[in-house]
């Protein structure tokens, strides 16, 4: 169990504190939903959590196989829909991994990423498009 505390600061801003570490994140409503877009929106954090989770799970696999993933990165694009209600409609994740990742481990790394807890927790109506590239 992990606890976080959320405080509504007014003006559509929230402050979130991670219980175990004390780390803090600020949120704001997005510009297209009455906010100023001055920080991550709550739905932005869902997309960021997906990419972060995928890279973390890949990192766990890589550590066990003695593969260096340092420098791997991700790009996430979140698209909202309004019908039948406002929600995340699509998350596009582009993961870039080092070219040094051995060919024989790439499929297993990709499978691990797609099995991350955030990916598995998202509703099936949220379209998830994931690509992997191995930079030279």
Image: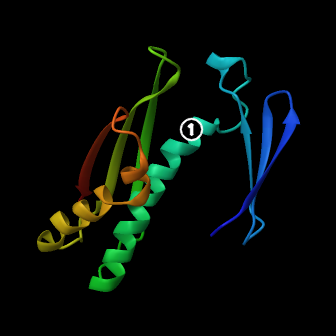
Q: Relative to residue 44, is residue 78 drawn left or right?
A: left
Residue 135 showing in the rendered view = yes
Vertical placement of 126 versus 115: above or below?
Answer: above
Vertical placement of 82 versus 64: above or below?
Answer: above
Name, please, the residue furthest toward the right: 10
Vertical placement of 74 versus 81: above or below?
Answer: below
Q: Relative to residue 19, is residue 32 drawn left or right?
A: left
Q: Relative to residue 70, is residue 1 drawn left or right?
A: right
Query: Could you say which quadrant of the image residue 129 lies in?
Result: top left
Q: Nearer the viewer, residue 132 or 119?
A: 119
Q: Position of residue 90 (x, y in %)?
A: 38, 31
Residue 66 showing in the rendered view = no
Q: Relative to residue 120, is residue 6 drawn left or right?
A: right
Quadrant (top left, top right, bottom left, bottom right) of the C terminus: bottom left
Quadrant (top left, top right, bottom left, bottom right) of the N terminus: bottom right
Q: Position of residue 118 (x, y in %)?
A: 44, 53
Q: Position of residue 45 (x, y in %)?
A: 58, 44
Name, please, the residue furthest toward the top: 83
| Residue at the image position 70 percent from the left and 37 percent from the top | 39
Of helix, strand and loop, which one carries label 1? helix
| Residue at the image position 70 percent from the left and 28 percent from the top | 29
Q: Which residue is mark 1?
A: 44
Q: Nearer the viewer, residue 86 or 56?
A: 86
| Residue at the image position 85 percent from the left and 27 percent from the top | 11
State the scheme by which the image is colored. rainbow
Name, please, the residue furthest toward the left: 104
The 10 Å Cα crowd at callout 1, few under 14, some 14 to 19, many 20 or more, is: many
Vertical placement of 96 versus 70: above or below?
Answer: above
């Amino acid at each position: 169990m992990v606890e976080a505390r959320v405080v509504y600061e007014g003006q559509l801003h929230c402050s979130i504190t991670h219980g175990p570490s004390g780390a803090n994140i600020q949120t704001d409503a997005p510009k297209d939903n009455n906010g100023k877009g001055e920080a991550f929106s709550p739905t932005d954090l869902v997309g960021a959590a997906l990419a972060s989770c995928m890279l973390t799970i890949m990192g766990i696999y890589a550590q066990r196989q003695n593969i260096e993933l340092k420098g791997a990165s991700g790009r996430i694009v979140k698209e909202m829909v309004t019908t039948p209600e406002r929600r995340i409609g699509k998350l596009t994740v582009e993961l870039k991994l080092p070219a040094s990742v051995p060919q024989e481990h790439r499929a297993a790394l990709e499978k691990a990423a797609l099995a991350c807890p955030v990916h598995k927790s998202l509703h099936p109506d949220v379209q998830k498009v994931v690509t992997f590239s191995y930079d030279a």
